[in-house]
Amino acid sequence: MTRRKVIFYNDLDNTWLISEAFNGDKAELEQHGSADYCDGNWADFMEAMNGVNNLVGFLDVLSMIWRSYHSSFPDEGQLPGPRLVFAHDPEELRDKVKFLDEV
């Protein structure tokens, strides 16, 4: 399955906000016969990101993506919401995303 993170450049303080990894999407989870599921495909999520031009918009879409993933574990509702990691320069950014399939 494809591991992805979403990155937003915040020009107010010259940092990058990096989402935690999303594993697969609706099609990939179904293809692998996963007990976990997702409400959308990655292309749909990226289309929603296309109109984002500020931090609030980024956080709104990121939250929507996060809510689209559903775990087969019974305590799914107890999981924390999306977490962000910050990078303060291009080298730190590369280090935080170097093992991903897509960014």
Image: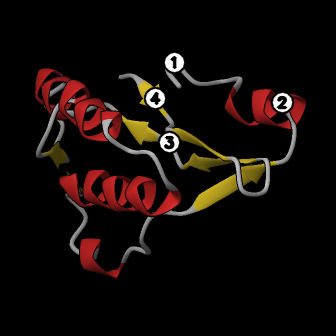
Quadrant position of residue 95 = top right
Residue at x 38% of width, y 44% of height: 52
User: In the rendered structure, are the residues bearing label 2 and label 1 in contact, judged by CB atoms less than 8 Å apart?
Assistant: no
Residue at x 29% of width, y 50% of height: 65
**Would you place residue 31 above or below residue 55 in this image?**
above
Earlier-in-chain disc, 3 versus 2: 3
Q: Which mark is residue 3?
A: 4
Q: Position of residue 54 (x, y in %)?
A: 49, 53
Of tags 2 and 1, the one toward the viewer is 2
Q: Secondary structure at mark 2?
A: helix
User: In the rendered structure, are the residues bearing label 1 and label 4 in contact, judged by CB atoms less than 8 Å apart?
Assistant: yes
Of residues 28 and 47, the one nearer the viewer is 47
User: In the rendered structure, are the residues bearing label 4 and label 3 in contact, judged by CB atoms less than 8 Å apart?
Assistant: yes
User: Which residue is identified by label 2?
Assistant: 90
Amino acid beneath label 4: Arg
Q: Is residue 16 left or right of residue 8?
A: right
Amino acid beneath label 2: Pro
Earlier-in-chain disc, 4 versus 3: 4
User: In the rendered structure, are the residues bearing label 3 and label 2 in contact, judged by CB atoms less than 8 Å apart?
Assistant: no
Which residue lies most toward the bottom here? 78
Residue at x 25% of width, y 40% of height: 48
User: Which residue is identified by label 1?
Assistant: 101
Q: Position of residue 82 (x, y in %)?
A: 46, 63
**Mark-to-mark CA distance, 4 and 3:** 6 Å
Of residues 54 and 72, the one nearer the viewer is 54
Amino acid beneath label 1: Asp
User: Which residue is identified by label 3?
Assistant: 21
Q: Which mark is residue 91?
A: none
Earlier-in-chain disc, 2 versus 4: 4
**Mark-to-mark CA distance, 3 and 2:** 19 Å
